[in-house]
Image (tube, coloured by chain):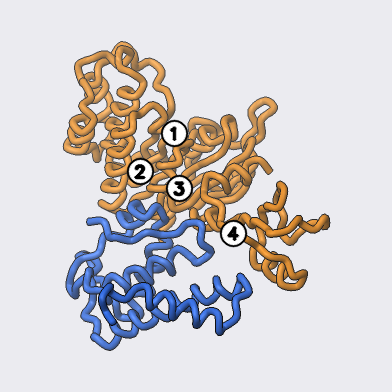
Chain colours: A blue, B orange
């Protein structure tokens, strides 16, 4: 069972961190439900073309934060995660997306007012047609 | 973690060629790839681990036993697949199995048959009549079935077709997951390295460049594209430059330098494994 995770190998964000965040997103988004099994560390390393060292690190962090749990001899499973915690992940992801968009604009020397204008335009363009 | 094999400060001189000193600790559950250009000493290192060549300095232990000691029990813990087999041509796979199986107390006939079937190896044909790819598959079956805790493979997929390479990867994953086992393999195949390796032991003309976690090599170099012409002075961690583009081994220091000198970067990326290895091996 291969997870829908895609890593950016050319990004400077550490791979284990990318894996951690994407698994959290899959749990928050409901793709990975409580109790469902995760691939073994070795299989995951093969699928994501990384090492067992990196996967073990991501799994350990996720376990420490209560997103997954390992049962000796049985494997690793998605833990029961409270709705508030799932909500928090979604909020964080949205904030991060806006922050990186803002970084792009600022690196092109846009002013904050110009960014606000662009933001308003984007929202306008996404409104369903015929919506007055 | 438990070290299944240990190579300590090993050196070997063959005519003009000098290997090492090289050290390597092989832990259970890990796959180490030996990488390097042709003639960099990968096969020699594997032979030394099998005591088929004598080290001029340093020592090698398998399951805590010196390979050059009187106690040869270590041989039951390690299986080795060389690149070529001398003297096998006249024999069929069936005959070879009958010679080899009794030599290994833990021989796993089920495993042998599974591999033979997965790769459709004809057991009645003489070894010399098989294609190079088929020979590799047969040797692999005869090596893995020894059911040891350490596998040493010398370019095991060099002649395999694409679907066979995928089967090979799946087979090794299943094998390593079924116990306290470890693999050391020399390879030039990027796919083997990407999908299997945890550690890369890098050799260049006999010189040991280091053993790295795969991710360390993947984050070793960063390429920057600059808006304007590069300053003439050497940049932090600079490895190479061409036009407005350059490669550095110190991206953080470079970013600080850019802020300080008001330089603008258009794009940047971390070099992938192949690019990084090429840089490392051409140093």
Secondary structure at numbered mark 1: strand
Q: Nearer the viewer, residue A37 or A7?
A: A7
Query: Are the numbered discs 1 and 2 placed on the same chain, yes or no?
Result: yes
Disc 1: which residue: B154
Secondary structure at numbered mark 2: helix
Query: Are the numbered discs 3 and 2 placed on the same chain, yes or no?
Result: yes
Residue most extreme to the right: B233
Nearer-N-terminus badge (1/2): 2
Q: Which mark is residue A6?
A: none
Q: Mark 3 and 4 residues: CB-CB less than 8 Å, in contact?
A: no
Place residue B261 in its image quadrant: bottom right
Mark 1 to mark 2 CA distance (whole Å): 17 Å
Disc 3: which residue: B32
Taking the image as shown, residue B39 lies to the left or right of residue A94, namely right
Quadrant (top left/top right/bottom left/bottom right) for the N terminus of chain B: bottom left
Disc 2: which residue: B77
Mark 2 to mark 4 CA distance (whole Å): 47 Å
Taking the image as shown, residue B182 lies to the left or right of residue B118, namely right
Percent across and percent down for residue B67 are: 47, 41
Secondary structure at numbered mark 3: strand
Percent across and percent down for residue B233 are: 82, 57
Observer-side mark, 4 or 1, equals 4
Q: Nearer the viewer, residue B130 or A35?
A: A35
Letter of the chain that mark 4 sits on in the rendering: B
Taking the image as shown, residue B174 lies to the left or right of residue B58, namely left
Nearer-N-terminus badge (4/1): 1
Residue drawn at 39 percent across, 43 percent down: B74
Secondary structure at numbered mark 4: strand
Observer-side mark, 3 or 4, equals 4
Observer-side mark, 3 or 2, equals 3
Q: Is residue B112 placed above or below A13 in the rendered structure? A: above
Mark 4, Cα crowd under 10 Å, few <14 / some 14-19 / many 20+, is: some
């Amino acid at each position: 069972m291969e997870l829908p995770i895609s890593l950016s190998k050319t990004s400077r964000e550490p791979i284990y961190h990318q894996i951690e965040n994407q698994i959290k997103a899959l749990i928050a988004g409901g793709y990975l439900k409580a109790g469902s099994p995760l691939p073994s560390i070795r299989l995951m390393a093969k699928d994501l073309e990384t090492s067992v060292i990196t996967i073990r690190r991501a799994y350990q962090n996720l376990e420490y934060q209560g997103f997954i749990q390992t049962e000796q001899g049985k494997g690793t499973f998605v833990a029961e995660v409270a709705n508030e915690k799932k909500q928090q992940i979604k909020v964080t992801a949205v904030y991060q997306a806006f922050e990186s968009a803002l970084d792009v604009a600022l690196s092109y020397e846009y002013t904050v007012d110009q960014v606000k204008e662009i933001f308003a335009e984007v929202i306008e363009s996404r409104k369903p047609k015929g919506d007055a | 973690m438990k070290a299944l094999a240990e190579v300590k400060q090993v050196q070997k001189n063959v005519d003009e060629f000098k290997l090492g000193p090289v050290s390597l600790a092989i832990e259970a559950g890990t796959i180490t790839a030996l990488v390097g250009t042709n003639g960099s000493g990968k096969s020699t290192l594997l032979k030394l681990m099998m005591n088929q060549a004598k080290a001029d300095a340093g020592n090698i232990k398998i399951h805590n036993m010196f390979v050059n000691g009187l106690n040869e029990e270590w041989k039951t813990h390690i299986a080795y697949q060389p690149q070529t087999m001398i003297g096998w041509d006249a024999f069929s796979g069936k005959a070879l199995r009958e010679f080899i199986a009794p030599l290994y107390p833990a021989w796993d006939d089920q495993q042998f048959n599974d591999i033979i079937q997965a790769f459709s190896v004809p057991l009645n044909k003489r070894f010399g009549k098989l294609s190079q790819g088929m020979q590799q598959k047969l040797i692999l079956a005869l090596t893995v079935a020894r059911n040891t805790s350490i596998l040493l493979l010398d370019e095991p997929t060099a002649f395999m077709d694409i679907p066979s390479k995928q089967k090979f990867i799946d087979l090794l994953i299943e094998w390593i997951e079924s116990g306290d086992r470890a693999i050391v393999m020399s390879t030039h195949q990027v796919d083997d390295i990407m999908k299997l390796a945890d550690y890369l032991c890098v050799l260049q003309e006999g010189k040991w460049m280091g053993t790295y976690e795969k991710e360390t090599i993947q984050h070793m170099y960063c390429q920057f594209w600059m808006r304007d012409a590069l300053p003439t002075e050497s940049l932090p961690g600079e490895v190479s430059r061409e036009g407005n583009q350059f490669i550095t081994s110190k991206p953080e220091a470079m970013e600080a330098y850019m802020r300080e000198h008001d330089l603008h970067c258009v794009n940047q990326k971390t070099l992938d494994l192949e690019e990084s290895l090429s840089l490392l091996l051409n140093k």
